[in-house]
Image (tube, grey):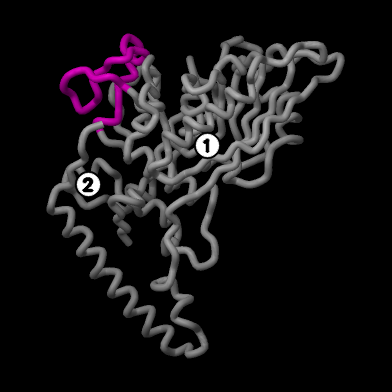
């Protein structure tokens, strides 16, 4: 992945933050001095615990093609291997995935589940009845065949919901059984990236190095159809072609080294999105101050370019980004999602 080097002048941004925080604390202290019964510990400036890890319980459901169809071979061992890969890929950021159960389902005698359409009625009904509760709980529904719609009959590998979409009873991942193939399969890991709010490294098929706030140029790749599926590609930062190992690409060798399958900026964004949109904050934990506080984190590219972050810009990205519910042209669901990030365990900048 290469080294990340933050210019020295960025330290001045942190100094400005410290000065502004001191001024804000002084003002709040003056206000609370008039309320002697309120403890200083409730003001959020001290004695709080940082969130440095989280656990995701993963529930799998498989629907047989028919009431007489055989079960897929070794499906449970395959999904457990996928959990192992997820933990290898995200262990450094301390997001732990725990396999909870694989439930087997048999369709009604008159139902055909050999191929289902994205969000069709019987699929949605199954999802509503079986989704595990909790925003940070991942439910994966495994089907035998999947298509985008009845009109275009486009085959899908999978589709997934994003964290800042309204969370409903269908929140999770729907994936074809053929793409759950143990440790070498990458579709589910790719979709978990989407579930935590990541977009593709190339943004959309056909686009050429469109800027995505929060991702470095070295993370971004071309969406040109001639190269998007190739193993070796030239990243948007330029230079020589390199093997694209990133899970959020369509590279033929993505996930070759699981622990390097997500870059530092992607891992940071996933943790921040999971905390803001899925897990939330518990009593006594450190949390942002003010509305849309997650929007006040810097973009990684700003820092690498030696710039103090544009606070208003980052907040507006979060609040004003539209999301499409339509299926992708090919491969996993392609949706543009622009979100601010924080480097929660290496470089942390909170600009108020």
Residue 171 visible? The answer is no
Q: Name the residue under label 1.
A: 162
Residue 229 is covered by the magenta coloring: yes
* Displayed quadrant of residue 244: top left
User: Residue most toward the left?
Assistant: 8
Tell me which residue sits at (20%, 43%) in the image: 304
Residue 250: x and y in percent read 40, 19
Q: Which residue position holds label 2?
A: 303
118 w.r.t. 305: above or below: above
- The residue under the point 24% across, 30% down is 218
Q: In this view, does 9 lie to the left or right of 102?
A: left
Alpha carbon separation for disc pair 2 and 1? 26 Å
The segment highlighted magenta reads 217-244
- Residue 211 position in % (x across, y down): 29, 32
Give the quadrant of the N terminus. Answer: top left
Residue at the location (52% across, 58% down)?
281
- Identified at 32% across, 79% down, the residue is 26
Label ID, residue 257:
none
User: Which badge, 2 or 1, comes first in the chain's sequence?
Assistant: 1
Question: Could you say whether the residue bearing mark 2 is in a helix, strand or loop?
Answer: helix
Closer to us: 320 or 221: 221
Answer with the quarter of the image where residue 3 lies: top left
Mark 1: few/some/many CA within 10 Å (<14, 14-19, 20+): many
Task: Give percent across and percent down for residue 195.
Answer: 51, 36
Residue 149 lies in the magenta-colored region: no
Q: In this view, does 246 lie to the left or right of 62?
A: left
Q: Quadrant of residue 125?
A: top right
């Amino acid at each position: 992945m290469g080294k990340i080097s933050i210019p020295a002048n960025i330290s001045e941004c942190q100094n400005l933050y410290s000065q502004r925080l001191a001024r804000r604390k002084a003002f709040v202290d003056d206000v609370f001095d008039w309320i002697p019964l309120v403890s200083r510990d409730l003001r959020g400036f001290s004695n709080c615990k940082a969130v440095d890890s989280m656990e995701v319980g993963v529930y799998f459901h498989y629907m047989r093609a028919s009431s007489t169809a055989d079960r897929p071979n070794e499906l449970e061992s395959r999904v457990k291997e996928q959990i192992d890969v997820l933990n290898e890929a995200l262990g450094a950021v301390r997001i732990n995935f725990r396999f909870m159960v694989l439930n087997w389902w048999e369709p009604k005698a008159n139902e055909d589940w050999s191929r289902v359409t994205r969000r069709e009625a019987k699929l949605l009904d199954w999802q509503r009845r079986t989704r595990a509760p909790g925003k940070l709980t991942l439910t994966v529904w495994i089907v035998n065949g999947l298509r985008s719609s009845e009109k275009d009959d486009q085959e899908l590998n999978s589709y997934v919901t994003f964290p800042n979409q309204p969370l409903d009873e269908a929140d999770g991942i729907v994936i074809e059984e053929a793409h759950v193939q143990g440790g070498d399969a990458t579709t589910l890991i790719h979709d978990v990236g989407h579930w935590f709010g990541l977009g593709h490294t190339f943004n959309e098929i056909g686009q050429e190095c469109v800027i995505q706030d929060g991702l470095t140029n070295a993370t971004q790749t071309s969406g040109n159809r001639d190269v998007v599926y190739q193993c070796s590609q030239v990243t948007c930062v330029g230079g020589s072609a390199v093997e694209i190992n990133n899970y959020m690409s369509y590279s033929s060798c993505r996930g070759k080294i699981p622990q390097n399958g997500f870059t530092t900026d992607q891992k940071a964004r996933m943790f921040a999105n999971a905390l803001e949109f899925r897990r939330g904050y518990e009593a006594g934990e450190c949390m942002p101050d003010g509305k849309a506080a997650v929007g006040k984190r810097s973009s990684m590219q700003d820092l690498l370019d030696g710039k103090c972050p544009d606070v208003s810009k980052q907040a507006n990205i979060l609040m004003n980004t539209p999301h499409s519910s339509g299926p992708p042209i090919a491969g996993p669901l392609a949706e543009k999602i622009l979100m601010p990030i924080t480097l929660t365990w290496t470089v942390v900048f909170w600009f108020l």
